[in-house]
């Protein structure tokens, strides 16, 4: 298997994870009565606070940009960790489950509370299960997959 460069892995893995994750979030938001614009404004509210809800399409675009920036950061963090501990990428499903849980909890318990997000963080059962599954399968797996493309696994390229 031919390896990818680190920048390519970060870009491809981060973007795929980000696309799948935001597609899920928008779909679940629509299911719950939100428009895509409103969902993206909720994302932007982590940076802009309540003002995100009055900015229309512009703040929705900020939310989308924030979402992808975070996706690329999370991708970079996993790849750097896996370069130090290649075993992280050796078992993709186990790593995706672990990393998905880490990202989910970090976002809910650290990032959102420390941001300008104007609402209390909740753990409603259905939303929590769906969001956790999304972080594992739609976010974690593409990140682990891209990482595997960039580093040696078991002495093989």
Image (cartoon, grey):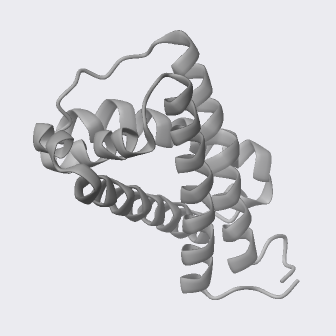
Q: How many numbered marks does the figure carry?
A: 0
Q: Is residue 154 above or below residue 29?
A: below
- Provide residue 147's location: percent of width, then percent of height: 66, 69
Q: In the rendered image, which quarter contains the N terminus?
A: bottom right
Examine the rendering and report whether any part of residue 39 can be seen.
yes
Q: Nearer the viewer, residue 57 or 107?
A: 57
Q: Is residue 65 above or below residue 9?
A: above
User: In the shown orientation, is residue 81 left or right of residue 118?
Assistant: right
Location of residue 134 (image quadrant): top right
Location of residue 82 (image quadrant): bottom right
Q: In the rendered image, which quarter contains the C terminus?
A: bottom right
- Provide residue 78's location: percent of width, then percent of height: 54, 60
Residue at screen point 22% across, 32% down: 113
- Provide residue 96's location: percent of width, then percent of height: 68, 47
Q: Nearer the viewer, residue 140 or 42?
A: 42
Q: Is residue 101 above or below residue 144?
A: above
User: In the shown orientation, is residue 97 left or right of residue 23?
Assistant: right
Residue at screen point 24% across, 20% down: 120
Examine the rendering and report whether any part of residue 151 can be seen.
no
Residue at screen point 63% across, 88% down: 5
Q: Nearer the viewer, residue 78 or 124?
A: 124
Q: Nearer the viewer, residue 99 or 63?
A: 63
User: In the shown orientation, is residue 151 left or right of residue 121?
Assistant: right
User: In the shown orientation, is residue 68 left or right of residue 87?
Assistant: left
Location of residue 142 (image quadrant): bottom right
Residue at screen point 23% across, 44% down: 46
- Provide residue 61's location: percent of width, then percent of height: 32, 60
């Amino acid at each position: 298997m031919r390896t990818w460069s680190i920048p390519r892995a970060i870009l491809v893995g981060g973007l795929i994870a980000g696309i799948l994750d935001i597609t899920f979030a928008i779909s679940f938001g629509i299911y719950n009565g939100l428009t895509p614009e409103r969902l993206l404004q909720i994302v932007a509210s982590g940076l802009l606070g309540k003002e995100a809800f009055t900015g229309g399409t512009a703040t929705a675009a900020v939310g989308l940009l924030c979402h992808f920036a975070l996706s690329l950061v999370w991708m970079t963090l996993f790849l750097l960790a896996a370069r130090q501990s290649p075993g992280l990428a050796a078992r993709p499903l186990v790593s995706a489950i672990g990393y998905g849980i880490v990202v989910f909890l970090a976002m809910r318990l650290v990032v959102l509370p420390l941001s300008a997000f104007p609402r209390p963080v909740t753990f409603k059962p259905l939303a929590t299960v769906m969001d956790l599954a999304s972080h594992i399968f739609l976010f974690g797996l593409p990140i682990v997959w891209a990482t595997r493309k960039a580093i040696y696994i078991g002495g093989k390229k």
